[in-house]
Amino acid sequence: MAKLTESMTNVLEEDSMEQDIESPVTIHQPKLPKQAREDLPKNLNKECAKRKIQRYVRKDGKCNVHHGNVRETYRYLTDIFTTLVDLKWRFNLLIFVMVYTVTWLFFGMIWWLIAYMRGDMDHIGDSTWTPCVSNLNGFVSAFLFSIETETTIGYGYRVITDKCPEGIILLLVQSVLGSIVNAFMVGCMFVKISQPKKRAETLVFSTNAVISMRDGKLCLMFRVGDLRNSHIVEASIRAKLIKSKQTKEGEFIPLNQTDINVGYYTGDDRLFLVSPLIISHEINQQSPFWEISKAQLPKEELEIVVILEGMVEATGMTCQARSSYITSEILWGYRFTPVLTLEDGFYEVDYNSFHETYETNTPVYSAKELAEMASRAELPLTWSVSSKLDQHAELETEEEEKNQEDQNERNGDVANLENESKL
């Protein structure tokens, strides 16, 4: 076990050194038995904890998730159209060429077999013989006739005759199947070309998110913009917090998704994205950042995923752009530099300053601590009221005591007078 622990220590040290160099090669750690993992030194666990946060969504919007061990691969074939659209361009073009080539070869082979079975190959050049297809003298000519039939080119040199019923039936079948293949493949290429994924390339998010005070409240903010003159219709913004959590029952939920309110109840999440906008999230008691301070923020392992959706004005198709922010990309105590200026008769957006921020005075405490401080600041007023009530009660007791003493003195004087009268 000691040798196993020592070997694992060397492996993890080499892995950490390669990560410091930021090598593009990913080294997978070997899986250890449970007993070996428990016997590892504690300092190795600390070193593993210092690793960089793995993104769930990359900055360009692509999800960093790979599906493995999918056994039911037949499900991809049940939706073959979507499968072809999702393929990369090189595979899509290869399938496009292969489908047409295979169908031409298949029907060309059938045309050649019909000619061969009828004996047309034995009567080439015989003017008294009526072949199924005129001027078909081999497989190559049958292949060319198949292309002419399916693509409806019709050069006029090879023509089917009326003495071949099986050829007429095959002509009908190839025409119908050819139309189906054309509709399927051309439709697939059209959908792939018209996909609005490239439209998302001109929807930009700020490199960093910031946390600062706005209207007396601590807010998390990021900026979005559209580089095109054609706008996004019905644009809306959403945000998700990606963070692992453990329930009260001990269940561990990896990459738990929590909604971040960016104006859903007030309508601020629906955008008129003509110029860059700053999206704000108020950190209140319902916010997942309620108890996070400036000192605690770098220690958190979390990721904020922002999603911008809308319809492309030119095509009417739905477009979605995504980005994410990890803890190192959230700046505490900063604001975004203004990018909109008023010129002579129009507004101008300076996208050179789109990602720029400037530092501002911001409390280093969490929103919860700030709320507690604000509540404490109101306590002296309560204390003053209570102190006045206590003072009033004390005055009343003092007055009662004085009245009692006066009454006692009077009673004593009356008693003395009665004694003197008796004497």
Image: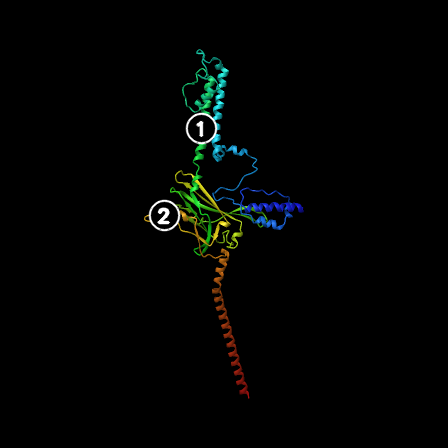
Q: Residue at x 47, y 28 (%)?
A: 97
What residue did someone put label 2 on?
348
Q: Residue furthest right?
A: 1
**Could you tell me the amino acid type at mark 1?**
Asn
Viewer-closest of 363 and 1? 1
**Mark 2, residues whose alpha carbon is within 10 Å: few (<14), some, or many (≥20)?**
few
The location of residue 225, given as percent across then percent down, is: 41, 46
Name the quadrant of the C terminus: bottom right
Q: Quadrant of residue 71?
A: top right
Mark before the other along the chain sequence, 1 or 2: 1
Q: Quadrant of residue 67?
A: top right
Could you tell me which secondary element the residue under label 1 belongs to? helix
Relative to 25, residue 147 above or below: above
Could you tell me which secondary element the residue under label 2 belongs to? strand
The location of residue 330, given as percent across then percent down, is: 48, 50
Relative to 109, residue 129 above or below: above
Viewer-closest of 12 and 238? 12
Q: CA distance from mark 1 to mark 2?
A: 48 Å
What residue did someone put label 1 on?
182
